Image (cartoon, rainbow, N blue to C red):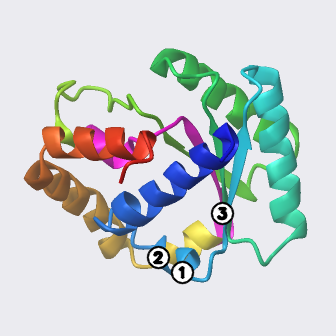
Amino acid sequence: MTDNQRVAAATRDWVEKVVIGYNFCPFAKPVFTPDLIRYEVDDSGNPADILETVYQACQTLRESPEIATTLVIFYRCGNDFDDYLDILGMAERLLDASGFSGEFQLASFHPDYLFEGEDPDDASHYTNRSPWPVLHIIREKDIEEAMKNKDESSAIYERNMRKAASLGSQHLAQLLASLRQGQD
């Protein structure tokens, strides 16, 4: 198995075991089961190349309605959370400059994700922690459709925080480490 295949497999396992398994995103299961998620791994280690991968992934989503969503995963760059946030900011500006704003949104996941204002050891961070840095490209129309029930959408965040707290940081850290190593 190549590094790219290993990274994609670990990310797919994370989606299945964490995102869907703990129901952190109730909208993920319907697109996971029929395998409508595209996993695009960038191994360049260069932010400019990552942005090109994001651009191409948006083009592919635009041209391929059968693909529900794309996860752009990169493991040779952006491992520092602040560097990752810089790449995320550049990717958001790219969407605006390329005419993808209003059509796609980015969700962000990182092994060291931290919610601003939260204790660094709080389990809540694991709702946005992934084995590798990820930019999740989502169609805005799908988000709008999913969020029609605002009561449910606002409850998701609160439920996720309770679930993460009940699982605990230690358990979630071990699970993430095992996924990253391909052992789970």
Q: Quadrant of residue 117?
A: top left
- Callout 1 touching callout 3 (CB < 8 Å): no
Tell me the number on the disc at residue 183: none
Depth check, front residue: 131 or 22:
131
- Classify mark 1: residues with Cα within 10 Å, few (<14), some (14-19) or many (20+): few
| Disc 3 secondary structure class | helix
Is residue 18 positioned above or below 86 on the image? Answer: below
Residue drawn at the location 49% of the way across and 16% of the way down: 82
- Residue 56 at x, y percent in the picture: 87, 47
- The alpha-carbon separation of the residues under discs 1 and 3 comes to 21 Å
Please tell me which residue is depicted at 53% across the width and 58% down the height of the picture. 12
Of mark 1 and mark 3, the one earlier in the sequence is 1
Q: Which of marks 2 and 3 is nearer the N terminus?
A: 2
Determine if residue 130 is in view: no
Which mark, by number, is residue 29?
A: 2
Which residue occupies the foreground of this view, 21 or 121?
21
Q: What residue type is labelled 2?
A: Lys
Give the left or right position of residue 155, taking residue 51 as reference: left
Q: What stretch is highlighted in magenta?
A: 125-141
Residue linked to disc 1? 33
Relative height, residue 50 to residue 171 (above, below): above
- Label 3, on which residue? 140
